[in-house]
Image: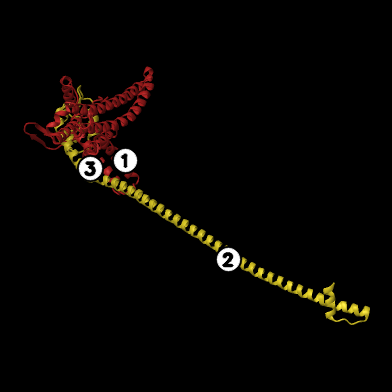
Chain colours: A red, B yellow
Amino acid sequence: MASPMHQFEIQTVLPLPSVNVPGIGVIDLSITNSIMSMLIAASIVVLFFAITTAKASVVPGRSQLIGEGIFSYIDDLTTGIIGHEGRSFFPFVFTLFTFILAMNMLGLFLAFTSTSQLAVTATLGMMTILLVLVVGFIRNGHNMYKLFVPAGVPWYMLILVTPIELISFLLRPVTLALRLFGNMLGGHVALKVFAGFVVSLGAMAAGGGLGLLGIPGAALSLGGVVALTALEFLVAFLQAFVFAVLTCVYLNDVVNLGHHH
Amino acid sequence: MAVETTPPPGPDSALAAAGTGEVTATTEAAHGGSESGGLPQFKFEYWGGQIVWLLLIFAVLYTLLATVFVPRLRRILDTRAKTIADAVEQARTVQAEAEVQAAAAKAEVDAARAQARALAGDARTKALADLARSQAAEDERLEAELSKADERIRAMRDAALTNVGDIAMDAASDIVAKLTGVKVTGAEIKSAQGAA
């Protein structure tokens, strides 16, 4: 019986030379199963939009309608949260959403889920928060401190509020990374555990005698796997959506700093 | 826990040597037993590669979406919105124009109706005037004829009355001649008449 954690093991698929980056160390650039799934997910996204917008017309066909639906969904999200300036951040949010969604979904069809790798989710989280910081400093300059000092709060409250705001800001990339990572990890572990029950209880039943009691247990576990798979599809979409929403919210904080808080 | 250094169950080393794809399933099966505790995600020797590749893939995906697909979809949606807005605008213009035309047509009809009414009124007054005039003329003519007839009747009566005197005179002379056998002249009778 494979451990439920085994599915998260990194395996080298195509060995490539390692690069020694001074100050950081040796980076193995081999294509692993994680990178392979990322490549496939990105290709699926590109392929999907290439197909759906191939014969782009004002009156959409069926496939174009699906592509437009996803587009409008995220477009409404960014303009809804950030406002009319959301359009300039839309490609980033759109890429995040489609890429994470593709990786999450791919995990339910392939043996590997890239978003269950903390390295991947942490990178995505850091990317997002770095963008937020860069945009914040470009747009607000030295006024960035207002992010941590809410207007209209008395000074004695600021002593309390500012550290909280600062910590909550610093925790943003951590929560972004851990939320996605934890959801994917937990879901896939639960699936694996229930699937493992089916096999072990089935094996017990195959032994005959009292072991036959394992049959209802195995059936129950199988039902659990089916239900959990359905749930995982929802989670796969929801986590991609949540990541996109939070990216918009964090961008909105710095884009509209001091406008309507 | 390095994958390649584990005492190799046959197929894995073969595949690693071959260095080809589609290993995932095989290696997963082959490595089943060689697990220990701890999350595989915290093996930091794999972080570097994943981060570099993720950044690379993300950059490529971002570039493709931002330069090709997003503008393409944006253009379609904008074109559609513009088309619909234009059509609505055009419909509104046409409707306004139709309303103006309808008002003009109504005014025209009203004018024509008023004109017709005026024309009819004129014709009626004219006809009435004509009628009155011709009636008056006729009345006058009849009046004249009547008075002429009266005149004639009066003349005839006068003539008749004169004749009556003559007849009476004749008759008187005849009667006198019959009764007396004396012929009397008109003058005598007249005098007698005057005496009577």
Q: Nearer the viewer, mark 2 or mark 3?
A: 2
Q: Is residue A236 visible?
A: yes
Residue A197 image offset from top left, x and y in percent: 32, 23
Q: Nearer the viewer, mark 1 or mark 2?
A: 2
Relative depth, front residue between B83 and A93:
B83
Subunit bearing disc 3: B
Residue pointed to by mark 1: A69
Q: Amino acid at mark 3?
A: Leu
Residue pointed to by mark 3: B65
Question: As drawn, is B141 to the left or to the right of A158?
Answer: right
Q: Is residue B138 above or below residue A162?
A: below
Q: Is residue A111 visible?
A: no
* Nearest to N terminus: mark 2 or mark 3: 3
- Which quadrant of the structure image shows residue A207? top left
Subunit bearing disc 1: A
Secondary structure, mark 3, is helix
Asked if badges 2 and 3 are on one and the same chain, I answer yes
Q: CA distance from mark 3 to mark 1?
A: 15 Å
- Which quadrant of the structure image shows residue A134? top left
**Label 1: few (<14), some or many (≥20) within 10 Å?**
few
